[in-house]
Amino acid sequence: MFGDTSATERMVREWQERATERAEKFNRMSEQVEQISVTESSRDGTVELTVASNGILTGIHIAESASARPMSQLSSEIMHTLRVAQSRIPELMERAVADTVGSDDSAGQHIVGRLRARFPEPPEEDQDDQVRSRRTGVQEMDYRVEDDYEPPSRPAPPRQAPGHAPSRPPQRRRPDDDFDEDYGSGSFLR
């Protein structure tokens, strides 16, 4: 009635084998990706940082000599070094994809493409730090205590017009003698 089922069984078995093989390849790729990290140093070596395969910063070392620079310059150097490190992730991921699932795999290509979009190549040379700071509105903050600090003075009270007695602030009404703490003898609205 239904015919030969051996061809269907063979097709299902082959599909299961391909799926199992592909899952194993992706598991190997996942293991390799977990091992990916990039360590990059700034141009002058004062900043060294490490990023994981997802681009998240996992380590940073700033040399003592960096404390002599303006913070805006140091932060620009950190961000440039971070972008350089992150831009190397797609290349390493592409190698992991090629070594495990193959470069022609559409899922692997998609993953690498997403990483290239997320972590593009950094500009060759960053613009001057001061120009960039002015353009983005970022200003360096100075937290030093100034020696010539004077607390603000209180404003003088307003002057009364001649012939008018100074006004007194209104006084609070005193409670009645029969004041009951729980408002049991009357309204609490007075």
Image: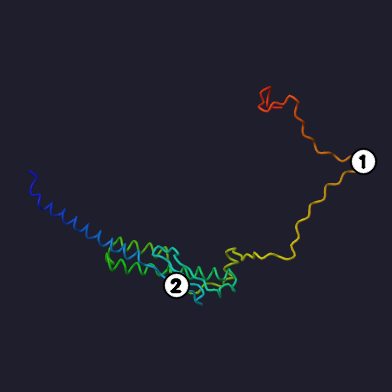
Front-most of residues 10 and 35: 35
* Tag nearer the camera, 2 or 1: 2
Residue 165 position within the rendered picture, expressed as x and y whole percent measured from the top left: 89, 39
In the image, taking residue 159 as reference, residue 135 lies left or right, namely left
Which residue was labeled with disc 2? 40
In the image, taking residue 103 as reference, residue 68 lies left or right, namely right
* Residue situated furthest top in the rendering: 185
Asked which secondary structure carries label 1, the reply is loop
If the image is split into quadrants, where does the N terminus sit? Answer: top left
* Amino acid type, callout 2: Glu
| Rendered image quadrant of residue 172 | top right
Q: Residue at x 82, y 48 (%)?
A: 157
* Amino acid type, callout 1: Gly
Q: Earlier in the sequence, mark 2 or mark 1?
A: 2
Above or below for 68 versus 112: below
Number of numbered discs overlaid on the protein picture:
2
Which residue was labeled with disc 1? 163
In the image, taking residue 50 as reference, residue 172 lies left or right, namely right
Question: Mark 1: few, some, or many residues within 10 Å (few <14, many ≥20)?
Answer: few
Q: Residue at x 59, y 64 (%)?
A: 138
